[in-house]
Amino acid sequence: MSLVRAASLFHRTPAMRVAACQPLVGQQRFASKKIDSGIEARRQLLAGVNQLAEAVSATLGPKGRSVIIEQSWGAPKITKDGVTVAKAVVDLPDKLQNMGAKLLLQVASNTNEEAGDGTTTATVLAREIASKGLKSISDQRVNPYEVRQGMQKAVEAAVAHLKSIAKPVGSHEEVAQVATISANNDVATGNLIADAMKKVGKNGVITVKDGKTLHDELEVTKGMKFDRGYISPYFCNKGTKIEYQDPLVLLSEKKISNIQAIIPALELAAQRHRPLVIIADDIDGEALTTLVFNRLKTGLAIAAVKAPGFGDNRKSTLQDMAVSLGARVFGDEALNLNIADVTLSDLGSAGEVVITKEDCLMLGGKGEKEDIQKRVQSLQELIDETTSTYEKEKVQERLARLADGVAVIKVGGSSEVEVGEKKDRVTDALNATRAAIEEGIVPGGGVALIRCHAAVAKVVESLEGTSEQVGAEVVLKALSAPLNIIATNAGLDGSTVVEKVQQAGATEGFDALRSRYVNMLEAGIIDPAKVVRTALVDAVGVSSLLTTSEVVITDLPEEKKASEGGMGGMGGMGGMGGMGF
């Protein structure tokens, strides 16, 4: 068996080494690789970064433009959402350029995941840091790793300054201002989000959905609501829905098939002339048939609903209901309760229950306030501890049902395209508002980053004569990039605007919508401190790693080989001419 000499690969130029070793018969076939290195590789990566950044930066600021994105189905999507644009760009024909674009997409995605907004600012900062960082390393021949350390020290100083100037959000008006700015100065959207926040509180859940009208709507639900309707329409007592006042509620983790198991609960409800609502894993067989028959023949006040969720989430949700209603969950292995031995204290109570085909709403649960507060606190701790985004969302929904309620913003419009574009803006505004409540607000429009200049300049001065100073200088220069782009998109000279703002007071800045210099806080032009901080940290994190790169490895496209023994081999069928065709 002959072996391929690996050393032969290194006789090729460093700029392009191709691993072209052919696999032995019977071994797994791997894709051939292309290895690019040095200045040319970094130039191509930067070209991809620039292409994505150009598309995304066009949306920045109140006078930023929209981007039209072709979709594989349906109408094109029109949006000003940075991360949506970034995801659409990442499919460039050149592999190196596409890799650079993907790195920049990671910046936008990280910022969107942590802060929910600021993706365009993060993209602009990342492009500026990457381009200036790579140029500095190439021109000044400095150590890339020391340059990266200098960038990180500069960011630490900038973050500390942002925290020092952040102002807590307290009033309803400030919440509306944050939401309005993030929704591209849509005052109606800002007020809608502020109203939703006011009604459900900081622990409440606010979701954004497609509306069915031309106008935006806010629907707020107080109480315990979940997406499971009645098991049988024969339980309905008000048209196509079920409404009961002051019902008793029986909760069970297990399926109920035997009517004998729930007769004691039915007798307890009948003795007190109160309706009974059963929420269980399922109700079928004899139990369901008997309940429906008695509802129709005797007018029995009864309703049956499947428990929401699946697996552990279903068990947890039933426990939440038990705390809210003052009930106990039958079938819970920890309690070891027999449903046939039910007593009045095992049943929960609600002020009102409304059940439709799609969902169930329980208002005025009679659970102990102390128990509810303990449950809320444990859920808040669980949210802080979990790292899964999906799990965190589920726990937040459970928390909202127990604590403050659920608000749904229904985005209206005259077409699917309009609703989609507006929905992106409303979602960004909602995320920005949450971030503002969490860490406070700072002057908006890129001014907060400009105000970090002095803090970062001190770091630059302290690192004089080192490679780290080069990295800190890169961050210092990049801080003005967002304001520069905002002014440029407004049709003005960005460098002139930046210079004037640098010379202005701490809260003075440029109102790009009205093309004037104002006190940003008084004018309501504000950004959540968390959004600005996250954008800067994520931008430096990825871009600084890009500046340390020397080699890029990509897959070579596979050569399409003619199929062996395929249609070409049918030439021998010429002899079929004798068949008289």
Image (tube, rainbow, N blue to C red):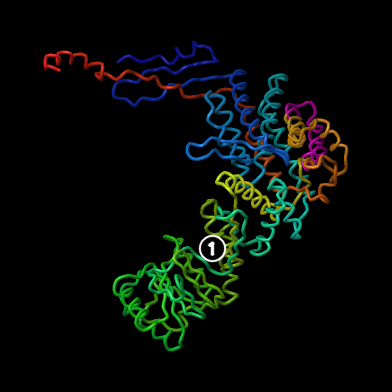
Residue 96 % position (x, y): 55, 24
Q: Quadrant of residue 335?
A: bottom left
- Is disc 1 placed on a helix, strand or loop? helix
Rendered view: 11 above or below 116: above
The residue closer to the viewer here, 453 or 527, is 527
Which quadrant holds the N terminus? top left
- Residue for point 14% across, 16% down: 576
Q: Amino acid at mark 1?
A: Arg
Rendered view: 241 above or below 68 = below
Give the x, y percent position of residue 539: 66, 36
Query: Mark 1 highlights which residue?
Result: 398
- Left or right of 15 in this view: 235: left
Q: In the rendering, at what x and y percent does residue 219 appear?
A: 59, 62
Residue 135 position, x and y percent, is 70, 22
- Which secondary structure dominates the residues rendered in magenta? helix
Q: Which residues are magenta?
A: 447-470
Q: Is residue 450 magenta?
A: yes
Instruction: Please identify the quadrant where the C terminus is shown.
Output: top left
> Which residue, as the protein is rendered here, is positioned at the far left?
579
- Residue occupying image coordinates x 61% and y 22%: 42
